[in-house]
Amino acid sequence: MKAEARTPQLLLLAVVIVFGCIRASPPPPATVVLPSDANALDSMYRTHDYFALRERLSNTETNLASTGFYLAAVQQAFNDPLRSNSTIVRALQAMGVSDSLRFELRRMQLSNDLRLYEYDRADSVAAVLLAAPPPSADSATLADIRNTDQLLRALRDVPPQVATITGSSILHADGAGHVLVQIGDSLRHYGFDTGANLSVLMRSEAEALGLQIRPVGLTVGSSTDVSVTADIAVANQLTIGHVAYRNVVFLVMPDRMLTFKDGFQIRGLIGFPVIEAMGEIHFRRDGSMEIPAHASARGMHNLALEELRPLIQVSYGGEELACLLDTGSGQTEFLAPYYVQHRTSFNARGEPDSVKTGGAGGVRTLPVYRLQRVNLEIGDTTVVLHDVPVYTTFLHPPKDEQSCAIGLDVLHSLSEYVLNFHSMTLTLH
């Protein structure tokens, strides 16, 4: 058995926010697309392959009653929530939209409003969803929406997050990957995690910063199936380098959920909403980061979002895969959907193994296979990895699981990688 090395970044994966609207479920089958097209579009959407879905839609005649859901999903995935909402409004007005499809369109609208930090408007959409859900809406989906609505009710008076970039910034991370953050008059060192859909603070840290904690009782899970309730706090001012933010929302977790047996603590974490607002970030091997004053125009468009989780287009073994880009994980992993698709091959030639994984909620031992050599193509760059685990069991609900997750082993093997959230591009150097 091989135990996974623990890094501070890896431990951040223990926190998973269970918001139903933040993970849209697959659309209902009630469309009027030709069956072959409907099946293809549905399959791409269900596997979160927005790159293939984008390509397929570019070659499909657009009919908002039939393809509007998928078009809005692609626009959302490539970081254009305003256009996605416009498509949703027009699709809702089209003829032939079933109640179940209307419900899913509004769920996506709710997600877009959260992306735009329009909390009051999102709360109105949540109220519509909960007022008259269709029979196709299962109890878990409705519970997730109610959970999200708890957040929205607590944020109705909070203005949208705003970021102002006054110049280029060079940030220097410490040995744990933490960078200097100013909240109000206080200086702190917090980690970065693009896989976190909200920034996070320990309760004692939020109290020490003098932030007002808003009781919410959000349902929060972990990678070890431990569920707790959490609250929120809003930082009126937050500064990182020459990027000044207003109205930054933090998830406030119980100290015990972010404290480990050896005493190590994750006191604070900067999540995706703050990182995305930087526009473009250059991550360098020496641990430094550069945030240009202006994001450059890039044309690869190989970066997408599964709600607030970044995905990248990867080629491996002749297949195009949509993989989670997880800067909170030290190692690249192939996950259960990939194993299920290639089960016969692994069962015939693979060598079973196991790994220990988890975080603040505890540790689990899970069965895996291992790939001794992996050549990953990302854009025009090939990265060679060794001893890559392939999980045979799902770490998350199947609808939320990607085929693979790209970790820091890929990113740190390069002199620099650049995330550009304006052009939705990952560039490797």
Image (tube, rainbow, N blue to C red):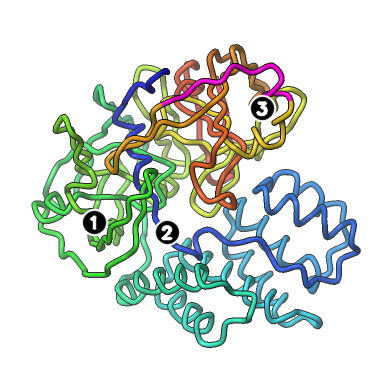
**Disc number for residue 379:** 3
- Expressed as whole percent of the image width and height from the top left, the position of residue 123 reads 43, 78
How far is mark 3 from mark 1, CA to CA? 37 Å
The answer to whether 10 is drawn above or below residue 361 in the figure is: above
Residue shown at 19%/40% (left/top)?
259
- Expressed as whole percent of the image width and height from the top left, the position of residue 415 reads 47, 16
Residue indicated by mark 1: 252
Task: Report the front residue among 306 and 218.
Answer: 218
**Mark in the foreground, 3 or 2:** 2
Residue indicated by mark 2: 18
How far is mark 2 from mark 1, CA to CA? 14 Å
Disc 1 marks which amino acid? Val
Query: Local crowd at mark 3 within 10 Å, few (<14), some, or many (≥20)?
Result: some
**Disc number for residue 146:** none
- Expressed as whole percent of the image width and height from the top left, the position of residue 153 reads 34, 77
- Find numbered disc 1 in the image and state the secondary structure of the residue it sits on: strand
- The magenta segment is 345-355
Residue shown at 62%/37% (left/top)?
403
The C terminus: image quadrant? top right
Disc 3 marks which amino acid? Gly
User: Dividing the picture into quarters, in which one does residue 66 lie?
Assistant: bottom right
- Expressed as whole percent of the image width and height from the top left, the position of residue 236 reads 23, 61
Q: Earlier in the sequence, mark 3 or mark 2?
A: 2
Q: Is residue 223 visible?
A: yes
Task: Report the front residue among 38 and 234.
Answer: 38
